[in-house]
Amino acid sequence: HNIKLAFFDGRGGPPSRGGGKTHRFYASMGKEIANKNIQLTIQGQTISSQYGSIDSAAFNIEQLINAGISSGVKGKHNVLLDKANYDALEVMANDSYESFLALRKHPLFLSYLETLSPLSLLSKITISSRPVKRNSGEALKLEDLRAISFVTSWSQLKQNIPGFYGIGTALKNQEKAGNWEQVEKTYHQSGYFKTIIDNCMMSMSKSDFTITEYLAEDEKFGKFWSVLHDEFELSKAMLLKLAGHQSLMENYPVEKRSIAVREKIILPLVLIQHFALEKLQHELPDEKRQAYEKLAIRTVYGIVNAGRNLA
């Protein structure tokens, strides 16, 4: 009907909030997809990290422009999914969703986050633009949590569950069903699927379960931690098998090294945060409680900044 549409796309920082490799996502869009005009909404902290200096702004804008050009001239990874590839993706998406939904319904899911991450303290950060939860009531409910606080809490734990959980189970199910050849075909033919896999690897590269390995013996959270850890190890094994790599992000050596350096730098902050949060689980005089809360909150800033992505 000669109607020209403009799509508004909200991009977060981490892959689990719509971030990750934005340019590769757009480059994977086929010619049949109406993406002539796209307007981006960039998440607050991502603006400063990606467009806060002339050099970084130029780089990220170039990446986005390049994505539009390559989408129009390259035909290998931006074709529409045929039925076989579409069906394979749909089955994996459903399996992954069901796996994450089962985790979300676990009775310790929210308690784990509240106890071991700074989730309950995020509302005290004075530079945040939104509240931790939508409902101002006292009791914290999972459905009231905002995406920012939910994803941030997992990243502070160095587990990044929203960025990969379920992908390992989905891939393993396909392997067991004898459909692995089709999965490999989809990976090599679909730039969209490949970008999803790359983003999962990025999230996992910023995870470190050795930091919380002591929880495996915890009376309350031990089994729940093991569920998270087992899915991480399964996902890692299946992603490496699919990509044909020996290590995560092997095809992005510069970014891989950048993440490794930053993760090493902030390791003391992560450990300090765990120390402060452990102290806050006990009865404390008001003065000491305020001191440990302040200590935990201060570590959040450094850990968040170190986990930022490029476009």
Image: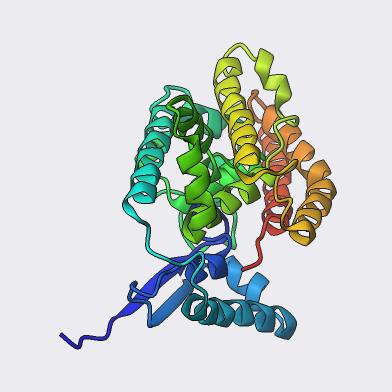
- Residue in the foreground of this view, choosing between 219 and 132: 219
In this rendering, the answer to whether 128 lies above or below 263 is below
Residue at the limit of the structure toward the left, as seen here: 1
Report the number of numbered marks: 0
Residue 47 makes an appearance in the image? yes
Q: Which residue is drawn at the image coordinates 38% and 83% (left, top)?
A: 37
Relative side of 79 to 77, left or right: left
**Image quarter (top left, top right, bottom left or bottom right) of the N terminus:** bottom left
At 60% across and 81% down in the image, what residue appears?
A: 61
Q: Position of residue 228 (x, y in %)?
A: 57, 28
Looking at the rendering, which quadrant does residue 53 occupy?
A: bottom right
> Is residue 121 at all visible to an observer of this figure?
no
> Residue 217: horizontal and vertical position, in percent?
68, 13
Q: In which quarter of the view is residue 154 placed?
A: top right
Q: Nearer the viewer, residue 189 or 213?
A: 189
- Quadrant that contains the C terminus: bottom right
> In the picture provided, is 173 more to the left or to the right than 59?
left
Q: Nearer the viewer, residue 143 or 65?
A: 65
Q: Is residue 43 above or below residue 101?
A: below
Task: Choose between 310 and 269: the one closer to the eye.
Answer: 310
Q: Work out which residue is located at the far bottom of the displayed protein and give it.
A: 2
User: Residue 88 placed where, x, y %?
Assistant: 39, 43
Colour scheme shown: rainbow
Is the residue 67 above or below the residue 90 in the image?
Answer: below
Tell me where residue 54 appears, x and y as whole percent: 71, 85
Name the residue: 37% across, 63% down: 80
Residue at x 66% of width, y 40% of height: 240
Q: Is residue 92 left or right of residue 76?
A: left
